[in-house]
Image: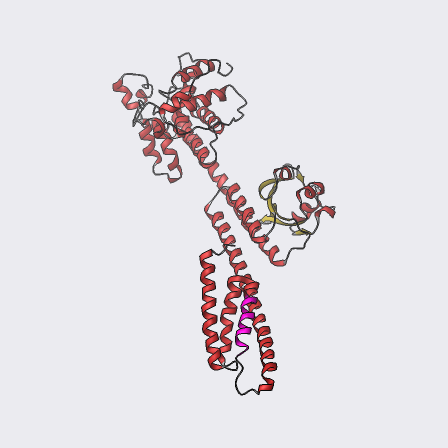
Amino acid sequence: MKKPTLASRVASVAFLAISIGIITVLVYLSGTKGIAVHFYYIPIIYAGYAFGDYGAIIVCLLSAALCGPWVPAEIAADTRVAQTQYDVLLRALIFYVIGIAASRASLELKRRIHEARNLYDVARSVTSSLRLRQVLNLITDHAVAVMDANACAIRLLKEDTKELELAAQHGLSEEYAQKGPVSLSSSQMDQVVLGGELLQMSDVGNDERWQYPEAALREGIHAVLSVPLVSKGRPLGVIRIYDSRIRRFKPREIELLQAFADQAAVAIENAALYEDLRDAYYETVRALTIAIEARDSATYSHSERVTDLAERLADFVGIEGEELEMLRFGATLHDIGKIGVAEGYLDSREGPAETQVFYRMHPLIGRSILQPISFLAPVIPIVVAHHEHWDGSGFPQGMKGTDIPRTARIVGLVDRYERLINPEAGVLGLSPKEALEEVTSEAGSRFDPQIVAAFRRMMKNPAGDAADETVSEASPEEAQASASPDPSAGSEE
């Protein structure tokens, strides 16, 4: 929950002091038998709301003491002291009950608001994001915060292996998260949970249904609550809450985790639908690209090879998520504008200037083709700029340096390399090593030197293991200084 600021606490104390002072004056004027004494309920209730139990207790005792001495004059002198003590104790008790009740009611209200806010945040994320890992991580984060637990994890069922794969977690150590496979054959607990029942264990170290008791002991885990993730009657996985205390979970906590489980199931279903839709989009785009390339004299399936190589390089330099996905589409569609270029000019990329102008229009034609498709809007910069050069000598806009999108720089480099090793029909291509030396010689002029350097290192490692590569947005001069080609670099021919 959000903690109050110092300014809000000072304002609350000031309100209490002023209100208690005013009420005390009214009680002094009317006596303790008058209605004014009941006004003390206001600061007591407010103190319980603002400061909890301790605030309510302090204010109720203070109020009882302040209204105690003002005994009405008609009480006999010999009974004045006893009556005063009785009034103080009785009012203190009444004020105490009211203060504690107000404090607890306030605490419960704040807790419910906190839970509702977290559930709303999760629901909003589920409906606004199709990134499954991102949504599931958000759910685990909120579940830990709302349920005052130590950790939360979501595991999804893999139908082929019947194992529960860790999809998201918050609060678990890396050692525990990677402790070993969670298989249905070995986990009695998960057999029950995936059967559609929730299950809680107050002490997993002494429960034979827990698969890894030693690991739980090292992690400091005792109580665990597991709830199934179910969609349309089909088990998808489990969500678990971990606590370091030996305890039983309250009904409201179980209901809350079930609400998070329902949100996670919706997110999984949305992500699956999105994956199907995205695959359908990509296959449509791929078919269109193949149809376009049938008109070009360049090697057939050029765009597919460029896409494969661009994805490898992007992964090597650390591009991921939405940017990587859009690079995949952009690499596949980078030559879509050729559909608007007459066949006689498709081979004019190195021809006379008067015929090159028609060929050089294809990035802009590609942009006009893709503009009506909102889904592919992030792809347009790649299509337009993949023939731009680092030194500004490219086309169609003469962009320079880091003004060229990073993904377009990657596609431009691998496009050039791929055409060198798979040139037009009737032309002898270069070996991979020769092609690599050719693009390296163009670092700083045609290509981003840092991307060229990363490409060389990647090609020296055919397995494609990503190194700690970062392609920074340095100036052309800084990037050129950092790109000193290694003469021994090159892939195997």
Percent position of residue 435, x then y: 43, 15
Q: Is residue 394 above or below residue 78?
A: above
Percent position of residue 259, x then y: 56, 53
Specify whether 52 is left or right of 214: left
Residue drawn 47% across the image and 24% down it: 309
Residue drawn 70% across the image and 41% down it: 212
Percent position of residue 311, x then y: 47, 28
In this view, the residue farthest toward the front is 77
Q: Nearer the viewer, residue 185 or 134?
A: 134
Q: Does the segment drawn in magenta span residue 313?
A: no
Specify whether 451 is left or right of 460: left
Q: Specify whether residue 438 is in view.
A: yes
Residue drawn 60% across the image and 58% down it: 252
Q: Specify whether residue 414 is in view.
A: no
Q: Is residue 405 above or below residue 260?
A: above
Using the rendered view, name the quadrant where residue 111 is placed: bottom right
What is the basis of the colouring in this image?
secondary structure
Q: Does the segment drawn in magenta span residue 66?
A: yes
Report the magenta residues as a range: 56-69
